[in-house]
Amino acid sequence: MDKQIEKMVSEKTFALVGVSSDVKKFGNAILKELTARGFTIYPVHPSLQMVEGVKCYKTLDLVVGLTPNLIVCVKPERAALLVKEAATLGFTSVWLQQGSGSKEATENGIAAGIHVVSGKCILMYTEPVAGMHKFHRGINKLFGKY
């Protein structure tokens, strides 16, 4: 496992932009799974006050200082701007969940000096890994992509 990914997940705390009250959305699944695994998650959503029993913050600047790590679970065109915002706010690591990453978002992070993970599912890297995520992790390890 990449040393920076290992550092991020060992800190067990993330802000999460793109959280949703819709149980079918990745943002909701990530919130539920990571909190069940003992992570502290700070969901950011402009109109939700609570989701899955966790307090939501209206804007990203309201979670500054609570964690250096950010998970982005929004459309790629919005993610590119969020990475820039995260960098100006002092976040040091951004995880672009599958479907959120883009060349522009990654380049924005690198240009700002922050670590960017893109194209990987965070649920494959946070213990305990089970079910399909465990299977996919095994396949990725087999082919040297983990």
Image: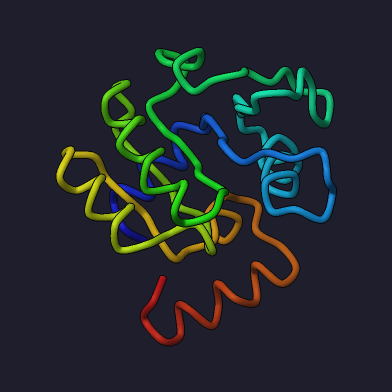
Left or right position of 127 against 140:
right
Q: Position of residue 91 (x, y in %)?
A: 33, 28
Would residue 85 appear left or right of 58 to someone viewing this image? Answer: left
From this view, report whether residue 102 is shown above or below residue 41.
Answer: below
Residue 45 in which image quadrant: top right
Q: Position of residue 72 (x, y in %)?
A: 50, 44
Residue under the point 54% across and 63% down: 99
Q: How is the image coloured?
A: rainbow
Quarter occupied by the C terminus: bottom left
Q: Residue at x 75, y 68 (%)?
A: 131
Q: 98 or 130: nearer the eye?
A: 98
Q: Is residue 131 above or below residue 135?
A: above
Quadrant (top left/top right/bottom left/bottom right) for the N terminus: bottom left
Q: Residue furthest bottom?
A: 143
User: Residue 49 falls in which quadrant of the image?
Assistant: top right
Q: Nearer the viewer, residue 104 or 27?
A: 104
Residue furthest out toward the front: 77
Q: Is residue 62 above or below residue 19?
A: above
Relative image position of residue 21 (x, y in whole percent): 81, 38
Number of marks present in the image shown: 0
Residue at the image position 70 percent from the left and 35 percent from the top? 35
Residue 54 occupies which quadrant of the picture?
A: top right
